[in-house]
Image: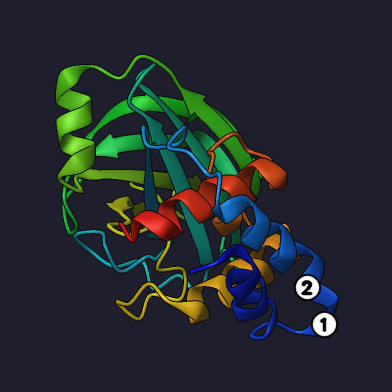
Amino acid sequence: MRPSDRVRRICAIVPRPARAVALGLALLAGTAGTATADIQFYRGTFTGNDFPIPTGSPATGTCWAWYDTLDRSLRIEWTVSGLNGNPAVPGMHVHNAPRQDIGNILFVIATGPWPTSGTALWEGLEQLDRIELRNGRLYVNMHTSAFPTNGEVRAQLERVACPPDVNGDGIVDNGDIASFVGLFLNQDPGADFTGDGIVDNGDISAFVARFLAAC
């Protein structure tokens, strides 16, 4: 496809206010590299239903994680609301266990009250930690004043197999471009394709590279 055809294709499927971003996607598509090929994407949904005894918490929230295979670091970002209790001791941690089970703490995010939206960086994951991450056996756990022992909600981290399939319909196509543009304009963590904690032009290039590779 010629560059001019790509520009028309992308710009035609997004609203006019977003066309500046879409144009950037189109122009970068011809030169996008593979600089972000070593970033793995993970995502989890906070729920009280994944404990051995469900907490019944009405809280909702999302946890994103980006694993850098070069420096073996995991950057975690989260947001949650509607908790029954307040963030409290013993804090917030990454544990090792499948759903419906309680596991050991592998990484401490906070030892006391924690922010309901925030980020953390776990550096130097050991080989066993990396294996458990890939197998979907790590979860982020939030302890509150209402559930101080095992936690009120947790998010099981699962790898996003095909990051450019932004809308999750199993196909990498024009719909994903429109979805990415929407996330980008809203500064949503889902548009952070470089995993650096900032939604900026670098993520446009990274998205294009993965989009053209089609996973």
Left or right, 66 with respect to 12, comes to left
Above-or-below relation of 15 to 199: below
Q: Which residue is mark 1?
A: 16
Asked if the residue under mark 1 is in contact with the one under mark 2, i.e. CB atoms within 8 Å, the reply is yes
Residue for point 19% across, 57% down: 99
Residue lying furthest right in this view? 17
Seen from the viewer's position, the closer of residues 6 and 78 is 6
| Horizontal and vertical percent position of residue 178 | 60, 77
| Horizontal and vertical percent position of residue 67 | 38, 34
How crowded pointer 1 is (Cα within 10 Å; few <14, some 14-19, many 20+) is rated as few
Residue for point 76% across, 84% down: 15
The answer to which quarter of the image holds residue 14 is bottom right
Which amino acid, mark 1? Arg
Picture mark count: 2
| Horizontal and vertical percent position of residue 180 | 59, 67
Secondary structure under tag 1 reads helix
**Does residue 145 show up?**
no
| Horizontal and vertical percent position of residue 171 | 33, 77
Q: Which residue is mark 2?
A: 19
How crowded pointer 2 is (Cα within 10 Å; few <14, some 14-19, many 20+) is rated as some
Above-or-below relation of 63 to 47: above
The answer to which quarter of the image holds residue 186 is bottom right
Image quadrant where one finds the C terminus:
bottom left
Above-or-below relation of 68 to 47: above
